[in-house]
Image: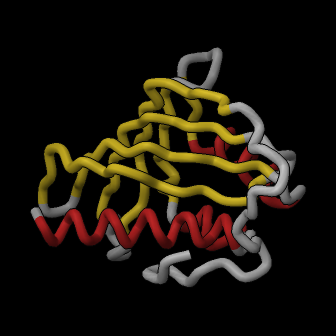
Amino acid sequence: MEELQLIAGQWLKAYAYTVATNDVDAHLAMVSQRLQVVGISRDGFLEYREWAKRRRNDMQKRRLLRITYKDPVMGVCSRDRMHFTVEETIKSTQGETYVLNKEVVLNLEPDGKWRVVEEHVHNVRLLPPARLGIPHANPTHPAEPGESG
């Protein structure tokens, strides 16, 4: 279980890094073509194609500043599948901050890469705008995965 927890933590850091560096291709490569996201669409769920279209658009238009993760809690895991809950904070370049509580399922795919295959968003909160004068992370020099920043 500790090994899978380490893998999940590394995956979350790498995923956040792709947003911080605006690396669309690397970001999408961490997501399974079988992705289903529940809880953020009026239709009930998004499949990979629609989710990828939205995310590619957001990243190409540089709408995402950063994504951070807090309090991952491991759930049921097997050798090639892991389940955890996590708090995700999304900071937009327009100054909006969203906090999502969600469940994430990663699968070890045939090419040996861990990819997200399911997300169940339980709630989304829009935080009040940050006060002026509070320093923000430098989006042009994000921390490498595994570094603090």
Question: How many numbered circles are shown?
Answer: 0
Residue name at image x 59 percent, y 27 percent: 125
Q: Position of residue 48 (x, y in %)?
A: 58, 44
**Residue nearest the observer in this picture, 31 or 138:** 138
Looking at this view, name the residue that lies furthest to the front: 133
**Residue nearest the observer in this picture, 44 or 87:** 87
The quadrant of the rendering that contains the C terminus is: bottom right
Residue name at image x 47 percent, y 30 percent: 121
Q: Position of residue 101 (x, y in %)?
A: 44, 34
Judge from the rendering whether residue 58 lies leftward or rightward of residue 55; answer left or right. Answer: right
Residue name at image x 62 percent, y 16 percent: 43
The quadrant of the rendering that contains the N terminus is: bottom left
Q: Position of residue 99 (x, y in %)?
A: 56, 37
Q: Is residue 25 above or below residue 69?
A: below
The answer, for residue 57, to whether it is visible in the render is: no
Q: Position of residue 130 (x, y in %)?
A: 75, 43
Judge from the rendering whether residue 8 lies leftward or rightward of residue 47; answer left or right. Answer: left
